[in-house]
Image (spheres, rainbow, N blue to C red):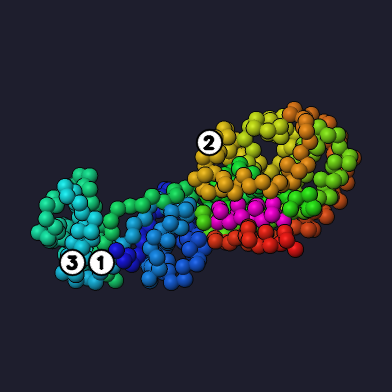
Amino acid sequence: MQYTEIMVRYGELSTKGKNRRNFIDRLGHNVRQSLHQFKNLEIKAQRDRMHIKLNGEDAQAVMDRLSQVFGIQNFSPSIRVERDIEAVKEMATKMVAEYYEPGMTFKINTRRSDHNYAYDTNEMNDMLGGHILETVPGIKVKMKNPDLLLRVEVRLNGIYLSFGKIDGAGGLPVGTAGKGMLMLSGGIDSPVAGYMAMKRGVEIEMVHFFSPPYTSEKALNKAKELTAKLTPYAGSIQFLEVPFTEIQETIKENVPEGYLMTIQRRFMLRLSVALAEKRNALAIFNGEALGQVASQTLESMVAINDVTTMPVLRPVLSLDKNEIIDIAKKIDTFELSIMPFEDCCTIFAPPAPKTRPKLDKARHYESRLDVEGLMERALAGVKVTRVQVNDEFLNEKKDEFAGLL
């Protein structure tokens, strides 16, 4: 079946009152960003629903991408027919016949946005239903829970026929709940935290700490690739690469081994907050799950959070590892996350970090360091990359070739 349009229905946006228009406009922007490689699409976000004219684009490919955009309740592929009732009868019968199997029932549901059309909804239902009963042998009408529900929408520019509803991603359009900075490692948890934040409408920017030569270019590209995995939900994401080598070397030289991780995390949080303030973000997000590792005990969180009053939000805090892995598999980040490219957190991890660090000791050890100077130099070296849908950063063939040089 050659579809001509996809009709998109909104989810929670129907509850947003006076802000509804802003939410719909943002959703339209996100859909355009996510579908940017489909050059022939025409996208119109109206008050009650969104219409995407395919203009020859692959309907299935567009729907696969559309199913990842937050703020969409469901959508239906549609076929546009001229406003001639005989042409509508012919297409309606053709669509039902294509999906019909012996014993199936059907129903026609007509909706008119053009109330001046020659036939009202009941007349349309009767005429189309009668023609299908005459033409498709064995089919029967069923008003409640039919096997096939054919939706008919009468508009000024044509009549649109569609079957069924495909579930969208739900949630809120990314960007309608403000901006946050996600502390992105190369592991399993932080991409899941980013996904969960975006589902509630938060625009996220990725903050990734990079420590050459201790961490490789592959580790950096892995983090960018993880970012690319999340772009369909938002359209595009800014990736901030923060040089962290000098800070980690300085901490290793001046801080007792048990507190290395605590002081490193305090610096990471300070840097993330500084970037948030500079880029108008309101909160910090991370992938910490309570009790999962040494730096994620309540005592560690207290010692690390001490450096800021900005909210630090942890979407996966109460999930166990298997729950996080299930979500990572769903959003296709799991296999990438477990690739063996070490990030700066694992490279400099002490063999026996403090699980219950004391706040006064963390402050004391940190007082030995030139905190302001280290921060200033790290922030001066930040690199920003805009990551879009379908961007690729890990090319195995190129990497293998480079290794031979």
Q: Earlier in the sequence, mark 1 or mark 2?
A: 1
- Other-residue count near label 3 (Cα within 10 Å), few / some / many at <14 / 14–19 / ≥20: some
- In the image, taking residue 119 as reference, residue 228 lies left or right, namely right
Q: Secondary structure at mark 3?
A: helix
* Horizontal and vertical percent position of residue 187: 64, 44
Q: Earlier in the sequence, mark 3 or mark 1?
A: 3
Displayed quadrant of residue 380: bottom right
Prevailing SS of the magenta stretch: helix
Q: CA distance from mark 1 to mark 2?
A: 45 Å
Q: Amino acid at mark 2?
A: Glu
Q: Which residue is mark 2?
A: 323
Q: Is residue 298 visible?
A: yes
Q: Residue at x 24, y 72 (%)?
A: 82
Q: Amino acid at mark 3?
A: Glu
Q: Which residues are magenta?
A: 217-231
**Residue nearest the observer in this picture, 125 or 262:** 262
**Which labelled disc corresponds to residue 90?**
3
Q: Secondary structure at mark 2?
A: helix
Q: Secondary structure at mark 1?
A: strand
